Image: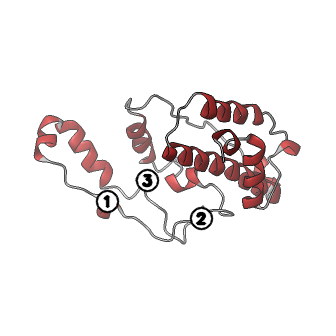
């Protein structure tokens, strides 16, 4: 299969619909306008990205995951229309270029018990229809890794913050216990 065939939007959409068992991308709910973005991404992957063989596989998997996530979210939304009446007050969006502190800001805000930060698995697979929930809990104490003495001497403030952040069970990257609500 050629690169152009692999990233044909219609082929990707058909494969995602087949895998997700749904073909409703939310147009009936007013969620329109996503296809031009898919067309631009696939055109860029084919004509500009100069992907390696592994890059092709990763890009394909990323697009498929995004399409299946959209199908799953729309299916869930159709099954639970009452969710549209739930208020979302003062959401916080963290955006920024790599290496500018967005992750540490996210982790810092996740420490606030009044805020609800999405966990990594929730962002990657927001619906259980095509990706099961994690079945294990990762506690902060098991994630701790020793930091070299040279690092703690070079950056003492960040070392103390890192120790504090890693010692909390509210770390944004931790998986929830199986019994907790999604």
Judging depth in this view, the residue of 164 and 18 nearest the camera is 18
Q: Quadrant of residue 100?
A: top left
Residue behind mark 2: 181
Front tag of 1 and 2: 1
* Residue 172 position in % (x across, y down): 44, 51
Badge 2 density bin: few <14, some 14–19, many ≥20, Cα 10 Å: few
* Residue tagged 3: 173
Compared to 75, does 52 lie above or below? Answer: above
Choose top left, top right, bottom left or bottom right for residue 156. top left
Looking at the image, is mark 3 or mark 2 earlier in the sequence? 3
Nearer mark to the viewer, of 3 and 2:
3
Note whether 147 is above or below 100 in the view shown: below
Measure how far apart labels 1 and 2 are at the Cα level.
Answer: 23 Å
At numbered mark 2, what does the secondary structure look like: helix, strand or loop? loop
Q: Distance between the residues labelled 1 and 3?
A: 10 Å
Identify the mark nearer the N-term, 1 or 3.
1
Q: Locate residue 140 relative to residue 74 in the image: left or right.
A: left
**Residue at left 47%, top 51%?**
113
Classify residue 105 as left or right of residue 60. Answer: left
Q: Quadrant of residue 93?
A: top right
In this picture, residue 162 sits left or right of residue 39? left
For marks 3 and 2, give the CA distance: 16 Å
The answer to whether the residues at label 1 and label 2 have Cβ atoms under 8 Å apart is: no
Labels 1 and 2: the sequence-earlier one: 1
Disc 3 residue crowd, few under 14, some 14–19, many 20+, Cα 10 Å:
some
Question: Which residue does the image show at 60% across and 61% down from the upper left?
Answer: 182
Q: Which residue is drawn at 74% across and 41% down?
A: 9
- Give the label on residue 143, or none: 1
Q: Where is residue 40 in the image (x, y as percent from the top left)?
A: 69, 30
Place of residue 68 in the rendered image (x, y in percent of width and height, measured from the top left): 69, 53
Dot 1: element: helix
In this picture, residue 176 sits left or right of residue 158: right
């Amino acid at each position: 299969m050629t690169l152009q065939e692999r990233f044909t939007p219609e082929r990707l959409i058909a494969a995602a619909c087949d895998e997700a068992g749904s073909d409703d991308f939310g147009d009936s709910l007013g969620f329109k306008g996503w296809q031009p973005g898919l067309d631009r991404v696939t055109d860029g992957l084919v004509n500009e990205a100069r992907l390696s063989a592994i890059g092709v596989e990763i890009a394909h998997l990323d697009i498929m995951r995004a399409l299946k996530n959209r199908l799953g979210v729309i299916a869930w939304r159709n099954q639970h229309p009452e969710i549209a009446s739930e208020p979302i007050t003062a959401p916080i969006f963290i955006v920024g270029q790599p290496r500018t502190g967005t992750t540490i800001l996210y982790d810092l805000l996740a420490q606030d018990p009044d805020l609800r930060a999405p966990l990594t698995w929730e962002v990657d697979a927001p619906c259980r229809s095509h990706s099961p929930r994690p079945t294990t809990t990762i506690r902060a104490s098991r994630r701790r890794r020793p930091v070299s003495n040279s690092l703690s001497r070079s950056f003492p403030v960040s070392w103390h913050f890192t120790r504090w952040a890693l010692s909390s069970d509210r770390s944004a990257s931790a998986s929830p216990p199986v019994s907790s609500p999604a």
